[in-house]
Amino acid sequence: MAIPAGLLDLFFALPKWQAYLGATIAAAFIWFVGSCIYNLYFHPLRHFPGPKLWAMSKVPYARVYTSGTGHRSILQLHKKYGDIVRIGPNSLSLSYPAAWNDVCGHRAQGQQENPKDPDFWRDHKHAIISANREDHARMRKILAHGFSAKAMQAQQPLILRYVTMMTDKLKLAVREQQSQNVVAWYNWTTFDVIGDLVFGEPFGCLDKTHYHPWVALIFEHIRGTALLAALRKFPFAEQIKTMMMTKELTEKYNAHLALGRANVDKRLAYTEPRDDFLESLARAREKGLISYEEILDTSEISIVGGSETTATALSGATYLLATNPDALKKLAEEIRTSFRHEDEIDLISVQRLKFLMAVIHESMRLYSPVPAGMPRRASEAGFMTARGEFVPPGTDLAIWQWSLFHNPKYFTDAEAFIPERWMGDERFAGDKLDACQPFSVGPRNCIGKNLAYAEMRLILARMLWNFDIELDPRSTNWFERNEVFLLWEKPDLYIKLKERAL
């Protein structure tokens, strides 16, 4: 088609910078329209169902991912479109029980795994969680002993010390103010435990009943991680990030890095052997088996993974018990009739409390500590899903835990808190309990699973041994006021605590 002569005359009559600008805008518009047409009608993922706008552009998913309510949006998409939904030009969300094995499961010798998304983990590229298959196996072998069930038993005196400190301090606090923000108390406890286990000393949160500066910076860093993860799916992401970083944000980010490095350096400077998780890393470094950068990134990931997520699960369980009096009564009775003295409640004895474990499972189903999708990429060979559909290499893959765990297709009365579903109750015979995998599966499942279960069982048991609990009206509809930015951004959870007369 010929370009009108008048239009050409107008173009050449413009100042040079305006002509270049106009040409750039026109080219960008043509590229955008062309990419939308390609994504809709010619892209390898064109056969997967999902909203057309999401298939055309990365913007809708990025907007939902950073909205704080993405978990609810993804659930609605799966209810409408099915188990596999196209949520971006090159992205799929999978929500069916076998998805865990399809995406994360063990692979036979010679088969490729679906690697972690490098864009998502760019700021922690040396950590065990983002490492390639070979590096992950090497680092996991170094860390495995410290996170084993046997190691948890060896660490029992340390964990008990902080849990006892928590309940003792809570008793004093309750005498002055009955309602307490248990989110803070759980965070103080789990951060002190993991601080001592990783660095050989606590953060002092319980001692001062206040957040350590580094812990406070970690919470701000988590939201920033989610925002950057969405941003990095677009061109010029690093340039945009630089422009968005105010002086205050830059200072906080640098302070976060400096405090993390200082904690690691202080621990590595110890010459005497110490019974903590970093001991194995320090010895491995001396043998050239792990680098300083890998220790630094893995330590930070261990602090967050070994504390914030456990505190989140405890907060969710406490809220659910406080709003479900029958379950609360049943659990309190189980705990209070199983022991004669509080000292009998330890990491070993709580393992026999079946209803307590059911409460923890059901709490993590309804309030998964990691609710958002942790992206992977289809391997270079691609793979076949459980539905027999081929997923092309390089496709971004996500399993949104909250959305899968709340899917009524796989859980009867999916929004109801019913621990009995985990105890063989016939009403839930059709439930797909294997869909609920809050610690993931396969060779990269959460290495801190044993620690998390040990802390959750012990802390809940000690809490209900020492206190009667009731929801403070200020925390009504607490679940609905939570937001998701990769992890939960939790409002204060006020619980009325009444010390039991023992």
Image (cartoon, rainbow, N blue to C red):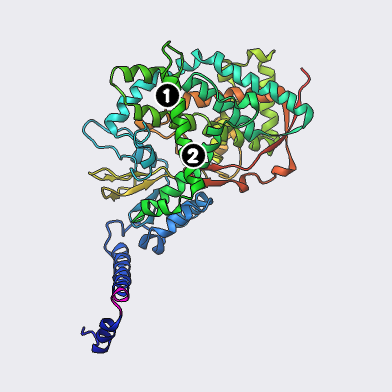
User: Which percent across, then down, holds residue 468?
Assistant: 73, 28
Quick check: 439 above or below 283? below
Is 16 part of what is drawn in magenta? Answer: yes
Q: Main secondary structure of the magenta part?
A: helix
Residue 441 lies in the magenta stretch: no
Type of the residue with mark 1:
Asp
* Residue 393 picture location, percent across and down: 26, 48
Q: Secondary structure at mark 1?
A: helix
Q: Which residues are magenta?
A: 15-19
The CA span between labels 1 and 2 is: 29 Å
Label pair 1/2, CB-CB below 8 angstroms: no
Q: Residues within 10 Å of mark 1 (few under 14, many from 20)?
A: some
Q: Residue at x 21, y 83 (%)?
A: 1
Q: Which residue is mark 2?
A: 370
Across and down, in percent, residue 138 comes to: 30, 25
What residue would you read off at disc 1? 265
The label nearer to you, 1 versus 2, is 1
Front in this rendered view, residue 64 or 389: 64
